[in-house]
Amino acid sequence: MLLKFPVQSFRKSLFFKLVITYLIVILPLILLGLYLYNWSYKNASQDLSRATLAQLSNYLKDLNREIDWMEIQQYDILEDNDVNRLAVTWELMDNVDRRETLNDLVHRLTTFKGSSAYIKDISVHIRPIRKTISASNAVHDFESTSYDYFSGTTSRTGGSLIHWGQSLYLSAGKETGVLGEEPLYIVQIELDTEMLRESLQQVNMYSSSRSFLLMDGAEFAIGSDPEADRTLRDGAAALTEPNEQAYRWIVDGEKYHLDTAHSDKLSLMVGTFLPEQEVSRPLSKFKNWAWVFSIATVLAIIVYAYSTYRYVQKPMLYLIQSFRRMEGGALDIPIEHQQEDEFGYLYNRFNHMLRKLQMLIDQDFKQKLMMQKAELKQLQSQINPHFLYNSFFILNSLAKTGDLDRIEQFTQMLGEYFRFITRNGEDNVRLAEEIKHSRMYTEIQKLRFSRRIKVRFDELPEAMEAVRVPRLIIQPLIENAYEHCLEKMPREGLLRITFGAEGEAFRIVVEDNGSELSDERIAELQDRLQHPSDTHEMTGMMNIHRRIVLIYGNGSGLFLSRSEWSGLRVEVRIQTGEEKGHAPASDRG
């Protein structure tokens, strides 16, 4: 069988019950809905909306094209050399040149105005010469009120049209290039409101239809006639949401069939409305059938809701409650039931899962935890012999020089160093102790390299002192910098150890100026740290990285990059918020 149910018979399955319930509820509604649909939506309402929306969309497209053309011409004027010359070199021009340039600009504005019936006037407000040039009034005194208003709208967001007073405008300013300075001049186009009103009358498809144009936020609104203006004024608040559909509009108790279309570019809504009685006149029988449909729907919903609750919701809630008890740690409370459907199968598998979880906790989890601790111990033990070898090497070098004072100083510091390692069996120490130990190591190395290697060891922030970390995670990184980079350098070596803290994330950075590793080699080493495998050699750096990850989880560990001195930069990240629980993040008393 392609479909197998985990119950004794198909008739007892949850699927069968839901299918039968669904057919009982939906089939009568579908048949009744089909009948009502085929009968009612053959009338004028749907056809009216379809035709009207197409008409409105075409109107917006035409208006968009007009506005786009205006904006193109507007920006041509904005970038015109003569206008720019008037604003910048007015004082250098003689009277004849000024008059000719102004006349040319007036002629161009007049020609632009005559090219579109939607344009009422075009003005250019030139701030430096305190003059305004327009198609209607030629050259006249500077209109500071218009300039001040439209200079504040040059950076506005939203549609390209601007509402001011009783009209709509297009505005663009020529910036000076100096931050905060007002534009040199502004090109302002005023749209003809009466022409827009006349164009709206062409959208009306019926004698009783009315149309309107509304800006987003109801800042500007005009109707196709005074009656449309009155209706729009009373009901504009319900039209502030951009829409493109047919719906019912109620104004002062009067119901209208409303179709709207919206232009995001212009932030304008165009709509047409028709009294609903004109639309619903052929649908008088529909109301009676609508009541029958509504009653039948309510009864069907009640039946379906009861069935769903009894066969789905109630058993599901019981299962959810059992899962919540399990999440709270109660693994010894199985579900008692007598059901034989899918939920009965789920209950049986849930009880089986509880038994399996108890077995895994007792066997697998505890065993893995012990293995993880053993691995941690083994990883830590790999570091000490390497430093012991280097310590004797330093002591041997000092003995050859015969400098007894430095030998005495070195052996005292070496004693302090090994006292830190051997004083007790703790796996983890406070970061302040680890840093003190690492600082001791650098002091030991200064006995050998005080002239060749400069060390900057920052003070540990107080917020990081109590953080618990594995032993020997900083000193081996410093030792690595000495052994592989700084000791072999022909020039002065630089070593810096810095600290940083951000919330529960802590950072220790060890960087030098002597690494000969290429960027590709550094990236390869970082990849090996992030994706360790049994085939990789267990280096000291990988050792440290794995120990930190074992305790603090992913996101912590070592991260390699190029230092600002072109050497190697090793960042130790400790995300205490990701801690796995092997060591406390800080002393808590």
Image (tube, rainbow, N blue to C red):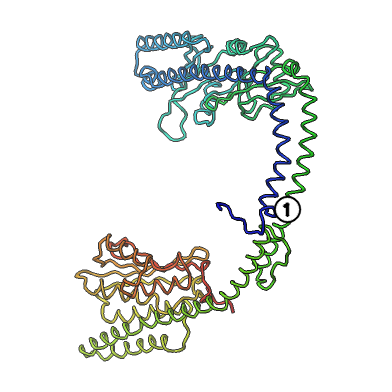
**In the image: residue 405, left or right of residue 48:** left
In the rendered image, which quarter contains the C terminus? bottom right
In depth, the one of 91 and 354 nearer the eye is: 354
In depth, the one of 293 and 546 nearer the eye is: 293
In depth, the one of 224 and 487 nearer the eye is: 224
Give how far across and how far down residue 508 sits, in percent.
41, 69
**In the image: residue 390, left or right of residue 358:** left
Does dot 1 land on a helix, a strand or a loop? helix
Residue at horizontal 45 percent and vertical 27 percent from the top? 183
Q: How many marks?
A: 1
**In the image: residue 504, left or right of residue 347:** left
Give how far across and how far down residue 408 sits, in percent.
31, 91
Residue 326: quarter of image: bottom right
Give how far across and how far down residue 100 sits, in percent.
37, 9
Residue 558: quarter of image: bottom left
The amino acid type of the residue labelled 1 equals Tyr
Give how far across and how far down residue 203 sits, in percent.
61, 13
**In the image: residue 201, left or right of residue 455:** right
Residue 95: quarter of image: top left
Circle 1 packing at 10 Å, graded few (<14), some (14-19), many (20+), is some
* Residue on which the image places disc 1: 311
Residue at horizontal 59 percent and vertical 72 percent from the top? 356
